[in-house]
Image: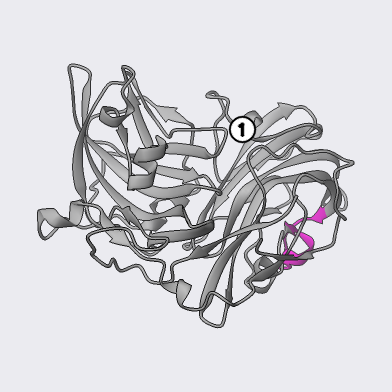
């Protein structure tokens, strides 16, 4: 499958304007705590969901849904979302690293409790993604009152046949109360990196859809033999997608991003796609015990580096050598490539990609992948 790219805004500041410019879109401010009351879903998304941009509203792709008794990280065939309960804590001062604690368990929906804070991660590579937190301040007569703050969110906007990505916030963002009500309004965001449109963006990436095999050794200080890397940028920045610690698969989480894994049980990854990740009963966490014959769903989102969806199947383990033989396949993967002060998001696959052993591509080889 051909790679795709979207331009990424380098700055996190907003430029206020009265209308859309080429490639610009209106998007919510990051880092500020805002409030919203949602009504339980009854056929009208605009009163039961959170939207972070005008394009999300126009295309009906919200970030969060209230449908009594569940608060759901909205999942589509075009993307994926997860939510976790952080407990009865303050929203003010909360940092983006709140979602990287090893003891957290993620699912696609929760039964919310008044006073609790919930972290939400949405990964929709070809449209939008978001990393934010909400605090439930009240639940009455089918409505839910929320305080919420965005750590980082991005929006892919297509103008004049060019797709650009506007980004607000970053992985170091902390939430604070607004100085005035204006911060909780959407602002027009411009893709500043359009100043250098002639630069050809590329990244060396593994093929999507192709089932490959490899052997991982227990991590003892050398990630090269213990981890999966899907691009040259991930290798150079030492940002693997997962690693084996001798007993568990670890979805690597950083202060600059996030990753989780779920055990799908005894099944093959042959023919698997993102729909296999969308069972409401699945529970995702930062690591999962390795079981021979089981397959695992991985979800990663690292706003400034890479992200994606992929699956791993355990073929065999050798306890004496502390190794595991696996099959793995990329459903979707993206990296941010920076050349001459311009940044592009290059990605392979999409959420409709189906994993096959005979899919095109060469295992173990990272191919130069340009923006299309």
> What residue occupies the far bottom of the structure in this picture?
340
Residue 283 visible in the shown view: yes
Comparing 55 with 132, the one in front is 55
Residue 201 magenta: no
Q: Is residue 198 left or right of residue 232?
A: left
Residue 140 pos. (x, y %) = 17, 21
Neighbourhood count class around disc 1 (C-alpha, 10 Å): few under 14, some 14–19, many 20 upward:
many
Q: Judge by depth and name the residue closer to the eye, 136 or 330.
A: 330
Q: Quadrant of the C terminus?
A: bottom right
Residue at image location 77% in from the left, 38% down from the top: 355
The residue shown at (61%, 32%) is 277
- Residue 63 in view: no
Q: What segment is highlighted magenta in the picture?
A: 216-227
Task: Return the residue found at the far front.
Answer: 160
In this rendering, the answer to whether 237 lies above or below 38 is: below
Where is residue 130? Give x, y as percent: 42, 49
Q: Quadrant of residue 326?
A: top right
| Residue behind mark 1 | 277
Q: How is the image coloured?
A: one colour
Total labels drawn: 1
- Outermost residue on the left side: it is 180
| Rendered position, 51 above or below 29 | above
Left or right of 252: which side holds 319? Answer: right
Q: Which residue is pictured at 46% across the width and 42% down the height?
A: 104
Identify the image quadrant of residue 278: top right
Q: Residue at x 29, y 54 (%)?
A: 94
Is 218 colored magenta in this rendering? yes
Secondary structure of the residue carrying tag 1 is helix
Please provide percent x and percent y for residue 286: 56, 46
Q: Position of residue 305 (x, y in %)?
A: 55, 64
């Amino acid at each position: 499958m051909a790679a795709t790219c979207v331009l990424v805004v380098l700055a996190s500041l907003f430029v206020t304007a009265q209308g859309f410019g080429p490639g610009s879109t209106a998007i919510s401010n990051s880092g500020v705590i805002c409030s919203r009351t949602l009504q339980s879903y009854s056929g009208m998304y605009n009163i039961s969901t959170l939207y972070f941009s005008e394009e999300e509203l126009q295309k009906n792709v919200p970030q969060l849904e209230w449908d009594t008794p569940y608060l759901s990280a909205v999942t589509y065939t075009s993307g994926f979302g997860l939510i976790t309960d952080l407990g009865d804590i303050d929203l003010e001062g909360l940092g983006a690293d709140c979602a990287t604690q090893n003891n957290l368990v993620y699912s696609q929906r929760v039964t919310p409790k008044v006073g609790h804070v919930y972290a939400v991660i949405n990964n929709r590579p070809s449209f939008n993604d978001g990393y934010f937190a909400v605090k439930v301040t009240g639940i009455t007569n089918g409505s839910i009152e929320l305080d919420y703050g965005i750590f980082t969110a991005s929006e892919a906007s297509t103008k004049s046949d060019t797709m650009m990505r506007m980004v607000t916030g970053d992985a170091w963002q902390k939430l604070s109360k607004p100085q005035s009500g204006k911060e909780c309004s959407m602002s027009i965001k411009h893709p500043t990196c359009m100043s250098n449109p002639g630069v050809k963006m590329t990244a060396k990436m593994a093929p999507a859809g192709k089932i490959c095999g490899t052997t991982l050794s227990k991590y003892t200080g050398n990630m090269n033999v213990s981890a999966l890397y899907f691009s040259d940028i991930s290798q150079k920045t030492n940002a693997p997608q997962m690693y084996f610690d001798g007993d568990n698969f670890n979805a690597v989480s950083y202060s600059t991003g996030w990753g989780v894994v779920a055990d799908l049980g005894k099944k093959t990854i042959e023919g698997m796609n993102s729909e296999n990740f969308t069972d409401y009963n699945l529970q995702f966490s930062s690591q999962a015990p390795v079981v021979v014959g089981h397959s695992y769903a991985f979800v990663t989102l690292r706003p400034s580096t890479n992200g994606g969806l992929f699956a791993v199947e355990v073929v065999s383990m050798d306890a004496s050598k502390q190794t595991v033989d696996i099959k793995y396949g990329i459903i979707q993967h993206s990296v941010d490539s920076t050349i001459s002060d311009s940044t592009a998001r290059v990605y392979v696959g999409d959420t409709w990609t189906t994993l096959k052993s005979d899919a095109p591509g060469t295992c173990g080889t990272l191919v130069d992948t340009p923006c299309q």
